[in-house]
Amino acid sequence: MKADLFADQIPFLKPWLGEEEAEAAREVILSGWVSLGPKVAAFERALAELVGAGEGVATTAATTALHLGMIVAGVQPGDEILCPSFTCMATINAVLLAGGKPRFADIDRRTYNLEPAAAEARLTSQTRAIMLVDQIGLPAPYDEFADLCQRRGLILIEDSATALGGRYKNKSLGGLGAPASFSFHPRKMITTGEGGMLMLNDPEWAERARVLRSTGASVSDLVRHQAKGTILQEYHESGFNYRMTDIQAAVGLVQLKKLPEMLAQRRRQAGFYDAALSELDELDPPYVPEYAEHAYSSYCIRVRPSCPVDAHTIVLRMAERGISCRHGIQPLHTEPFFRETMANLHLEETEAAARETLFLPIFPGLTETQQLAVVHGLKESVAR
């Protein structure tokens, strides 16, 4: 009998996986080739075609994809990378892996993405790149940052880990031009268990990224296997073990087929919440600018000043009702890792967003009955 880990609660999220993914993984396992191989290549081609990118390079995570993206784009050890503090530590881990120095700037109050004027004000002579984060599935204002980077001679990199399916001015994220990464963690739009992909338009950058992800070997294991051992690899630079497996990629190919329905469900669920929250004076629904199509990897609400309780209290009260929510993203510049080096940094909108926001359950398979229970729980939780 299969255990249901979510039987006694409305979960914050639940991956949409089934027999088709299990069968795809089974076929790869029985094939005898389970590491990086033809399924990975097929997954790379399928996602690149979907988002309009020239190349996809599958990796172990969005973090490792970002790391490779910075290397091939020209980031050097010691370079300063401007990015939001309102993001996951994984974003900054990629900067640190590349030898970069994170420099934080403030966010837009409504979108929670890096704010162009605030970012430009934080640039220094040491800044080499700007990393956008398409936070909670909402595209950042790409053109403004592309113009800023062109004016200042900077590299633009995009962390789209949470935003597969999001669109900026009718163009898919991942295909806008800058190196971009996606995540396939279970909390993201599609999942392969773990995994990520780097999206590139330069075939030479992509070829170098593929070499770097496979320990720096000039040819892959699959190519050597197909040549029956007659080809020898060479090493022209040190690399990493960032290889996705064919088992993961097989699951990813099935998930990609489901992505349109996943996006449709998330957007319907967001519309349901939007309508319900219009009746609550205490909470603000997500803001979506005209240029964007939201992927709704998360549904982020904000506690208004008129609300008699804070966001933390709402999360606790919802949990008491068997409904899992999450606190807003906590500012990285206040984390213990940065506490000494960032002691004097104050980012007003970032810190306010962390205090005032929380995430509601949203995922494919969430029922209207469950959403009604979430809304009812919210109405009770915001009462004094």
Image (cartoon, grey):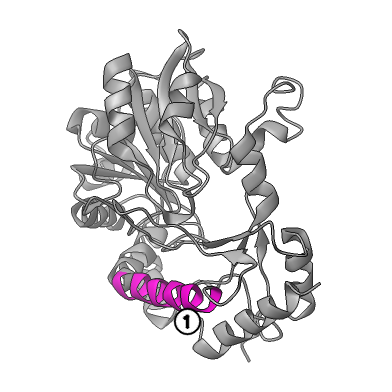
Q: Main secondary structure of the magenta part?
A: helix
For residue 87, above or below residue 83: below
Residue 104 seen in this snapshot: yes
Residue 330 seen in this snapshot: no
The amino acid at mark 1 is: Gly
Residue drawn at x 48%, y 25% is 82
Q: Is residue 263 magenta?
A: yes
Question: Between 112 and 78, which is closer to the camera in this rendering?
Answer: 112
Which residue is disc 1 drawn over?
365
* The C terminus, quarter of image: bottom right
Q: In the figure, is residue 128 to the left or right of 314?
A: left
Span highlighted in magenta in the image: 260-277
Q: Position of residue 145 (x, y in %)?
A: 34, 31
In which image quadrant can residue 69 be found? top left
Rate crowding at label 1 as few (under 14), some (14 to 19) or many (20 or more) other CA atoms within 10 Å. some
Q: In the figure, is residue 157 to the left or right of 122?
A: left
Q: Position of residue 109 (x, y in %)?
A: 53, 45
Residue drawn at x 49%, y 60% is 286
Question: Between 56 and 130, which is closer to the camera in this rendering?
Answer: 130
Residue drawn at x 33%, y 18% is 236
- Disc 1 is placed on an element classified as loop
Question: Between 162 and 351, which is closer to the camera in this rendering?
Answer: 351
* The N terminus, quarter of image: bottom right
For residue 45, above or below residue 105: below
Q: Position of residue 299 (x, y in %)?
A: 52, 64
